[in-house]
Every structure is written in structure tokens, then in C-alpha cells.
Image (cartoon, grey):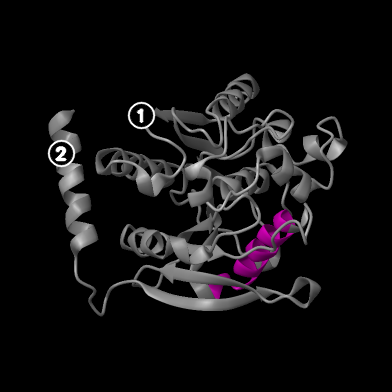
Amino acid sequence: MQRSFFMRYLVLALLLAAPVHAADPASELNVVFATPDHIELRLDYFRPAGDGPFPLVVCIHGGGWQAGSRATYQDTQNWFAKKGFASAAIQYRFAPRHRFPSQLEDVSAALRFLVKEHKRFRIDPDRIGMLGASAGAHLALLTGFSELKDCKIKAVVNMAGPTDLRTFAAAHTGDAALKTGLKRDSAELLADLLGTKDRKAEVYKTASPVAHIRKDGPAVLTLHGEDDDIVPIAQAESLHEALKKAGATERLIKIKGVGHVFTQWPEKERTAVTLATIDFLEEHLSKPAGGAADPEKR
């Protein structure tokens, strides 16, 4: 096991250090996918070299539903492409100016656009996964658990996302919170997002991924630091208890000694969860028997 992990670690290091060549990933940046409220929402798209069709990973940034940038995923997208995955990092409208479900609507709009333009982007609409961090993971889970008309999400990677907004409360908001853009306590953030501080309001249930779990939903991989003081690990544990109870495919990886911000983790832990993410996506986004269906015939 140690030898196997070391070899995979070495391969990863070589991939990340590799120079860019003509056959390396192609990209389209600042692609407008929707214009709600006359706001141009954009995505950054990366794909492997070649004709495809490629499995697609939709990446959603965090920032307390109020901040953040899709550009934070560009290194990850470049690396995904080298591993055979197309990816789209998307923009969404921010609270408090835009209340929930605006953010979820924007993610769905991005998916509809990508599926409609699947030939342009050389993607397989039957092999779609979601990946998000923090607030982005919350939106990735909600999207994955939704009954979408245009496509079916097969896998979700949840990096420390809030999963039950009825119980979500940060342990405290200190320097770590400021570094994530989360400058207010969780109650205020949720009120900005949902329009009320009343945890018994129906919108809190509607906006909670744990309330929408179903057996035939996507496989879920959760990566969560045990010392997370922004999104307590209890949020991950309750999600996975509910997934197990429903008979859904799930895996929870708890990382000792790390907090909420992935980029602040030691290199060993970051590498381990990166490898776990690739393994998970490869397992669940493998090509379906008989090939992909044409979404234009759906």
C-alpha cells in the first residue's frame, strides 16, 4: 500500500510539473451561458486534447454564497484535462442581492447550456459529475439531488459543504473565515441567502441537500477536515448517515488535523484527497454501456 501510494504520488508530482505542449488541454474562457436579470453569467471550460466525447466535471466555487471566483479552479481544470476529464468552472449570482434559489437556477442553467452545446464542447452528456467547495459544494449536492430534465448527475464531490442548513452553525468565525471570504457568522449568511433567520421556515429544508437524498441519486464523495471551524464535520456525518439509510452510493473521507481551507492543508493531505477524487470520478463517470444518448432526442 505504501509503495503504491508513493508511486501514484510521484506520477502526480510529475504531471503537475510537466511543461505545456501543443497537445495539452484546450480551453475556452469567459463563455456566457445565461443572462438572468440582464447579468452575463460566464464559465471557463477546459478539455483534454482529442475528439472526445469526454466526461464532464462542473466546478462550483465557495465563498459563503456571497463571494469567490470560478478562476480558482483553473489549475485544477488543467489537471483534470490531463486525466481525461472536461470541466467547466461556473459563475453564479451572489446573495444577498440575489436570494436562493437564484444560485441553484444558475447552476442548472449552466448544465442546460453545456448539454445543449455538447458537440461544440466535445462532452458526453451521460457522464456528468459535480465538484464544489464549501458553499459551492452545497450547490453541487443540491443540483445532484435534483430531478433534472436535461441530464442526470452521476457523481458529486463535496468538499466541506453545508448539508443541512437547519442545523448548520460555524463553530466560530475568525481568521480562517476571513480568508475564505466568509466575513459574517453563519446565521447572518443564511439569512442573506434565504431571506429569514427562522430555521423552521420551509426554505431552510428546501435549501438543505440532506432533505433531498434518494437511492437513485448520484454517488457522493465527501472530503472534510476534522478541525473545520467554518463548516463543522457533523454536517458531513449527518449527510452520509442519511445516504447510507437511503441505500445511496457514498464515501466519506475525514482528514485529521486540517481545517476548512483546502489550500492551507499540508501537501500530503492535499495529494491524498486529489488522488481519491480522481479515483472516484473515474469509477463513476466511466462510459455507459451502449454509448451516450443524444440529448437532442431526449
Q: Quadrant of residue 239 in the image?
A: top right
Q: Earlier in the sequence, mark 2 or mark 1?
A: 2
Q: Residue at x 52, y 64 (%)?
A: 70
How far is the residue under mark 2 from the one under mark 1?
21 Å
Q: Where is residue 298 drawn, in percent x and y?
A: 71, 61
Q: Residue at x 15, y 38 (%)?
A: 6
Tag 1 residue: 257
User: Callout 1: helix, strand or loop?
Assistant: loop
Q: Which label is found at residue 36?
A: none
Q: Where is residue 157 drawn, in percent x and y?
A: 50, 43
Q: What main secondary structure does the magenta stretch of the protein show?
A: helix
Q: Residue at x 54, y 74 (%)?
A: 119
Tag 2 residue: 6
User: Callout 2: helix, strand or loop?
Assistant: helix
Question: Looking at the image, which residue sits at the far front?
Answer: 174
Q: Please state which of residues 84 and 207 is positioned toward the viewer in this rendering.
A: 207
Q: Residue at x 19, y 53 (%)?
A: 13
Q: Estimate how packed mark 2 is, as few (under 14), some (14 to 19) or many (20 or more) residues with alpha carbons within 10 Å.
A: few
Q: Is residue 129 magenta?
A: no
Q: Is residue 80 above or below residue 214?
A: below
Q: Which residues are magenta?
A: 103-119
Looking at the image, residue 201 sits to the left or right of residue 14; the answer is right
Q: Please state which of residues 233 and 157 is positioned toward the viewer in this rendering.
A: 233
Q: Where is residue 191 drawn, in percent x and y?
A: 78, 44
Looking at the image, residue 70 sits to the left or right of residue 253; the answer is right
Count of marks placed on residues = 2
Can residue 2 be seen at all in this image of the molecule?
Answer: yes
